[in-house]
Image: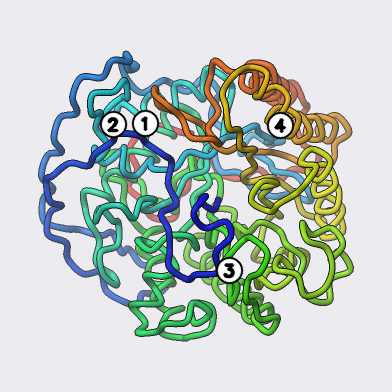
Amino acid sequence: MLRASQHFSSSLVPVALAVVFLAVSTTSAAPTAPVAVPPVLAPGTDTNVTTAPAQAPAQAPTAAVEAPAGTPTNPFGDTGFITVQGNKFVDANCKEFFFVGGNSWLTLEAASNQLHPDNTAYLGGRDLIQYLFATAQASNITVIRTLAGSADDSDDFVLQTAPGVYNEVAFQGLDKIINDASEAGIKLILPFTDNWHFQDGLFQYVEWGHSMATGDFFTDPAIIQLYKNHVTAIVNRTNTLNGRQYRDEPAIFAWDLINELRDGCNTSAPNATCDPAFTGSVQAWIEEVSAFVKAADPNHLVTVGEEGFYGPGSPDLGSNPSPGTGTWCSLTGQNFTQNMAPATIDFAGVHIWPDLWTVTDPASFTTAWLTAHIANAQSLGKPFIVEEFGKSINARDPTTISTVRDPVFTAVYNMLNSNLKADGIFKGAAFWEFSYIAGPPDTNQVLVNESTWSSIIEPAADGALQTMLSNPAVSNCMPGPLMSTTGSTATAGRR
């Protein structure tokens, strides 16, 4: 998702991709000294990052909101790795998998004990992660999408501090997110990097490559290698809490190559300066790095992580938020159907942001956007999900919520429900943003005491889960493993 200060700017200066945590400060303790990771390693090589022993994180102050006693246990059963068979997601028990999910940012910071309350009712530090998964579990939300890296440029807390050099405190925070998700029965979608902020993002790679052009992220061999090295370090990381390498972790549903890629057009709004030639560069990058990820981690699904804009030459240009040739959204570098076509992209996914895209009738646009992309995914024979969608509100009174935000959420989950009943290819949708804190939210966060949650999200999640559990096994299924046996010395426990 793009942030408010970026909506109508063509500046290349990155802005933090983050949840608005009011009055939240970071700890003053410096991360432990990092060490370098070997720069280029063949897929399958163990590249677990080791650093000097991490300092114990500072204890979070007592929060006014009571945190769960511990990580919740898994009520959903052992589903193992999710695979794609035909146009279905299938678990290790040959049951079809579909979901209602949520997006939660700043989880790395929370899990690393970097977010603390400051005279507010916020939960502190790692309690946030326990609360996130306990709340998700209680509402039958089975997938959480969050960055596998820093989501806040306001401080210097970052996962990758230099090319191949990692902050072990942050990596142990990511270990906790993945381990706690596994124990709670929650699946994760994890983008490797992000377009919208500097730290752990596209702009950092460009700087490391001694470039000033963001388009070089997709074309410069040295910068592409830096990205591949990071992928290698991530998928071969051994979790300090359960002993499994990330590539052997069933709690990970899928990897995103990048969150909301842009090439030559770093804005989501009109009046951008964009270059249609970049569309081919993005496609070549998608094909190259998705093949690399699948070789490095054959256990997990891969998708792009884009919004789903149609590019030059697409017959679906009329479905873009700004229809036609030469508009800002047609020149971002994306071209949905082409981007999702490679065999190394396992499923198709889009984002929906009617406010950021200056759409006049959000609910109608949402339905049309979904209809067009579902048809594209059907033509590709791949399952389809909405990775993130949201609707901003400028007040939190019940009338505003029910009349402004709820129609968009209803449009998404009604279409998901109808697809599931008809055995369609629309298999899951994750809303923005799952507010797992107590305190004043931002305009896109959804709180558990609001109608959007109780009247739309929870019924959709319950219906999806019950349908999934009651459906018969997928015919002609080739079951995948409950646990990987590719090399980790994993501790007991299956997800």
Other residues around mark 2 within 10 Å, as few (<14) / some (14–19) / many (≥20):
many
- Front residue of this view, candidates 274 and 253: 274
Instruction: Tell which tag, 2 or 4, sits nearer the viewer.
Output: 4
Question: Which percent across, then down, holds residue 108?
Answer: 34, 44
Report if the CB atoms under discs 4 and 3 are less than 8 Å apart: no
Q: Which residue is mark 2?
A: 126
Numbered label attached to residue 409: 4
From mark 4 to mark 3, how far is it between C-alphas? 26 Å
Mark 3 or mark 1: name the one nearer the start of the chain.
1
- Give the amino acid type for the residue marked by disc 1 in the picture: Ile
Looking at the rendered structure, the kind of residue marked 2 is Arg
Please tell me which residue is depicted at 58% across the width and 32% down the height of the picture. Answer: 394
Q: Are marks 2 and 1 in contact (CB under 8 Å)?
A: yes
Which tag, 2 or 4, sits closer to the chain's start?
2
Marking on residue 262: 3
Secondary element under disc 2, as helix, strand or loop, is: loop
Category of crowding for the residue at label 4, using alpha-carbon neighbours closer than 10 angstroms: few (below 14), some (14–19), many (at least 20) = many
Mark 3 belongs to which amino acid?
A: Arg
Please state the horizontal and vertical placement of residue 215, each as a whole percent of the image. 53, 79
Label 4 close to label 1 by CB (< 8 Å) = no
Q: Amino acid at mark 4?
A: Phe
Which residue is found at the position 61% from the left and 33% from the top?
393
